Image (spheres, rainbow, N blue to C red):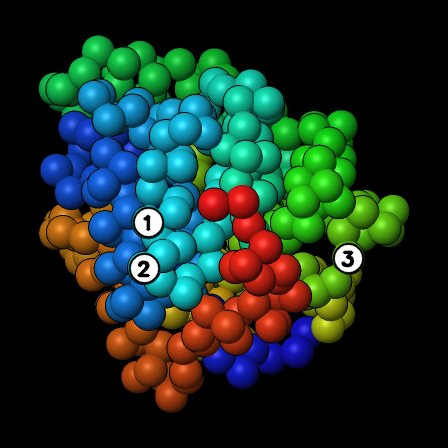
Amino acid sequence: MAKAKSVIITCAVTGGIHTPSMSPHLPITPQQIASEAIAASEAGASIIHLHARNAEDGRPAHDPDVFMEFLPVIKQSTNAVVNISTGGGLGMTLDQRLAAARRASPEMASLNMGSLNFGLFPLLDKYKTFKHDWEPEFLGMTNDFIFKNTFKDIEYVLKDLGEGHGTKFEMECYDLGHLYNVAHFVDRGLIKPPFFLQLIYGILGGAGAEIDNLVHMNSVADRLFGDDYEWSVLAAGKNQMGFASTAGLLGGNVRVGLEDSLYIGRGQLAESNADQVAKIKRIVEDLSLTVATPDEARQRLALKGGDQVGF
């Protein structure tokens, strides 16, 4: 693996996991999502990872028209790489999850590299009251839920968005086996270097948030992919900053944002995505590393350019 010359910061602005009752700072409306994305870019994020929500109740949304309320605003106001989720919200069909990216033809999109149990139901014990009826139902159903990403699904996305739109992927790997799924598609020629792996820790059903797991998965990826890939790390909740800092030391890239953690410090809610970006930027620079610009990220990930998108 070629050591990163600078650290690419991705910011995942709102996601489809946390619910409005968990934080008053979670962006919900298109205006809030756009504002948070722009501020995160100004704070140092090169890539902005985006979901959409229903403006009335905060439920994860898949309607491309909702995305188009904030995508052009972000593009006009920043040079950041826009990365659209194909994970959507738990329970959406694959076509619903792909709808926004198909419309927008972005430089990047996320791509989950395997099916897994995705357990959010323990959060029901943490939050006793909810603003909206859908929230406890959404969390509770994950006790009997599989986040489906079969080989057929992955191939479909690679061909539809990758070959059809020239979109490159943030390939989300929640466990060791997902790296071998990536290798399978590399061997078939459906994933071509340079590609971008996002190693994910702390989701119930995936790899636990233990540094040994990060080091081992990084070692396996090095053996499988050599110099053909870039990698990044995200960790859920309280593990966010520690794992991101470790990734920087190991030559990787980092992801922060309110999708992954609602906090900025122990027991302290983050008031914005930009606060988290600014914090990890400070940490990276204190480690004598530099932060990548959006154009550096584009060059290293071989992206098609912001002038080739559909928004």
Q: Are marks 2 and 3 in contact (CB under 8 Å)?
A: no
**Nearer the observer, disc 2 or disc 3?**
2
As helix, strand or loop, the secondary structure at mark 2 comes to helix
Task: Identify the residue at horizontal 57%, vertical 30% (top origin).
Answer: 98
**Residue at numbered disc 2:** 77
- In the picture, measured across the screen, residue 136 lies left or right of residue 228, that is left
- Where is residue 220? Give x, y as percent: 69, 60
- The answer for how far apart the CA atoms under marks 3 and 1 are is 31 Å
Which residue is nearer to you in this view: 23 or 48? 48
The residue under label 1 is which amino acid type?
Answer: Val
User: From where the camera sits, is residue 256 visible?
Assistant: no
- Where is residue 173? Give x, y as percent: 59, 46
Q: Are marks 1 and 2 in contact (CB under 8 Å)?
A: yes
Compared to residue 31, the image places residue 197 above or below, namely below
- In the picture, measured across the screen, residue 276 lies left or right of residue 206, that is left
As helix, strand or loop, the secondary structure at mark 3 comes to loop
Residue placed farthest to the right in the image? 188
**Residue at numbered disc 3:** 192
User: From where the camera sits, is residue 270 visible?
Assistant: yes
Question: Label 2 neighbourhood size at 10 Å, few (<14), some (14-19), many (20+)?
Answer: some
Which residue is nearer to you in this view: 103 or 214? 103
Question: Label 3 neighbourhood size at 10 Å, few (<14), some (14-19), many (20+)?
Answer: few
The residue under label 3 is which amino acid type?
Answer: Lys
The residue under label 2 is which amino acid type?
Answer: Ser
Q: Quadrant of the N terminus?
A: bottom right
Q: Quadrant of residue 2?
A: bottom right
- The answer for how far apart the CA atoms under marks 1 and 2 are is 6 Å
Compared to residue 100, the image places residue 70 above or below, namely below
- Where is residue 194? Give x, y as percent: 70, 65
**Residue at numbered disc 1:** 73
Q: Which mark is residue 216?
A: none
Question: Label 1 neighbourhood size at 10 Å, few (<14), some (14-19), many (20+)?
Answer: some
